[in-house]
Amino acid sequence: MVIHIALVGKNSGHLWNGLKEIIPAEKMYLLHSPNQDDFKHVDEAKKLKKEIEKRFCETILVKINPFEMTNIFNTIDEIVNKEMKNSNYQLDPFDFAVGVTGGTNIMASGATIGAMLTGTKAYYIHDDRKPPKRKRYAEFLPIPPINLLRSMTSSHLKILQVLDKAVYEFDGEKRKGVMKNKDLEKKLKLRPSTLNSALKVLKSKGMIEDKEENVKVIKNKQKNPDQKPFYKIEELKNQKLVEISELGKLQSKKASMKI
């Protein structure tokens, strides 16, 4: 059984060779763009769904942002996790095949990263309108799965899970996934040296944003009671903001699901 997750843009010819050669196709998730002035992607996807279901398998349409890579690999991760959970984990990542042909270059890159992050197979479809003639047009890509969870300690995963739920507010602005390093120390009961060491590892793996952002505070600069109060924003040099990355959010969810 194979669950296909495939991209489609203005051209859809590649879909058929993937479905014919990577079998048995149990289900297909078709990732497509929103309607645009020059091409009605949603309308065409609906037509394709009818054709695929008539000839091959159940098809589910999923609208994506074709110019946002994180949206694409997050979508693939959500599909894989949902299907595995619904199967009571009878499915494993190799029951999925991600087609990286079709759509924008960003869609193809996001789909390739999505396959690597989820440990699924990825395939490319050669254009059957161009020589040479082939026996098979679907070619699996030799990409290694990225299982970063195995190389991370429980402290690393706890930091990601706390950051993923964090909301930092300053001067009326809220930022999700951001927290003060001092608050992380208190929350996780870690020594400053232990936390700094863990954050260094997470930064090297791309799990947190590579920024050196000082914590800001608003201080009252009124020098005497008769003076009109005024306030100034200052930076605390000994405190930093820690922000989780999109990859860190993904790994946090995987750790929570114990996959």
Image (cartoon, rainbow, N blue to C red):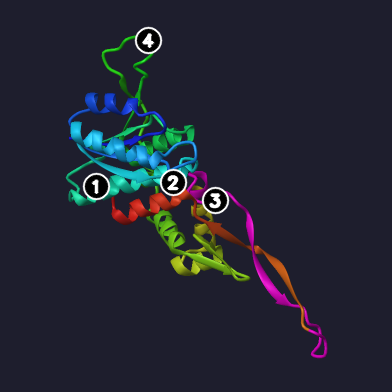
Does label 3 or label 2 sit earlier along the sequence?
Answer: 2
Does label 1 or label 3 sit earlier along the sequence?
Answer: 1
Q: Residue furthest top?
A: 132
Contact (CB < 8 A) between labels 1 and 3?
no
Front position in the image: 22 or 248: 22
Front position in the image: 66 or 158: 66
Q: Which residue is mark 3?
A: 209
Q: Disc 1 vs disc 4: which is toward the camera?
A: 4
Q: Is residue 15 rendered to the left or right of residue 41?
A: left
Q: Which mark is residue 71?
A: 2
- Could you tell me which residue is drawn at 49 percent across and 36 percent down? 38
Q: Which residue is mark 4?
A: 131
Secondary structure state at the residue bearing disc 4: loop
Does label 2 or label 4 sit earlier along the sequence?
Answer: 2
- Percent from the top left, x then y, of residue 189? 45, 67
Label 3: few (<14), some or many (≥20) within 10 Å? some
Contact (CB < 8 A) between labels 1 and 2?
no
Mark 1 residue type: Glu
Q: Which residue is mark 1?
A: 83
- Percent from the top left, x then y, of residue 166? 47, 64
Q: CA distance from mark 1 to mark 4?
A: 37 Å
Front position in the image: 208 or 43: 43
Residue 178 among those drawn in magenta: no
